[in-house]
Every structure is written in C-alpha cells, then in structure tokens.
Amino acid sequence: MWFSNAVVQVLKASGYPFEAHNVLDDPELRQGVKEFSNWPTIPQVYLAGEFIGGCDIVMEMHQRGELQPLLDRAFAVA
C-alpha cells in the first residue's frame, strides 16, 4: 500500500485533480489491469488515457522534474 500512497502524494502535490480506483479488492480487475497495460505491478498511472508507469517510474519522473510539465501539458489541453 506504500507505493500507492507515494503516488497519491505526488499527484496531490501537482495541484491537478485525479481519480484513484482500488483494484486490490477485486482479483479479477487487478489481473485485468495488469494484462491491459502489460505491466506487472500496482499502482499504475494513466494520463489522458495513456499508461505512464508504476510507482518507481512516477517517482523518478517527479524527482527529475519531468512529471509536472507532463501534467501541465495534459491539463492545458483538457
């Protein structure tokens, strides 16, 4: 659960709204999400319908300053 919380904190800090869905309560949904993205872990972050990555990737993007500009561009279009 720590990984999900870390991603939520980064997204909250971005200042943009986001939605979270708990797939851990539903094994079938959890497996379906993994198959859909071809990514083995949860959480999974999608931006404008595009898979961004899991916790490690999102945290690395945040630390390198790459996540906020990506969010800024996505929300400027929305």
Image (cartoon, helix red, strand yellow):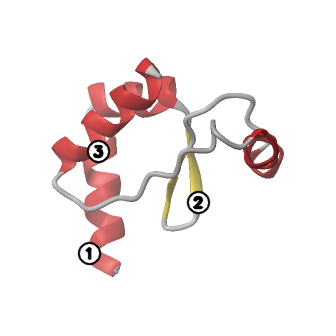
Question: Residue at 20% across / 48% down in the picture?
Answer: 14
* Left or right: where 13 falls relative to 8: left
Q: Secondary structure at mark 1?
A: helix
Q: Secondary structure at mark 3?
A: helix
Looking at the picture, tell me which residue is in the foreground, 49 or 23. 23
Label drawn at residue 50? 2
The image shows residue 27 at horizontal and vertical percentages of 77, 38
Gap in Å between the C-alphas at discs 3 and 1? Answer: 16 Å
Q: Earlier in the sequence, mark 3 or mark 2?
A: 3
Q: Are marks 3 and 2 in contact (CB under 8 Å)?
A: no
Q: Nearer the viewer, mark 3 or mark 2?
A: 3
> Amino acid under label 3?
Leu
> Amino acid under label 2?
Glu
Within the image, what quadrant is residue 67 found in? top left
The image shows residue 54 at horizontal and vertical percentages of 55, 33
The image shows residue 31 at horizontal and vertical percentages of 81, 40
Most extreme residue toward the front is 25
Within the image, what quadrant is residue 18 found in? bottom left
- Density class for disc 3 (Cα within 10 Å; few <14, some 14-19, many ≥20) is many
Within the image, what quadrant is residue 58 found in? top left
* Left or right: where 46 falls relative to 33: left
The correct choice, above or below, for 76 with respect to 13 in the image is: below
Q: Which residue is mark 3?
A: 11
Q: Which residue is mark 1?
A: 76
Question: Residue at 36% across / 29% down in the picture?
Answer: 5
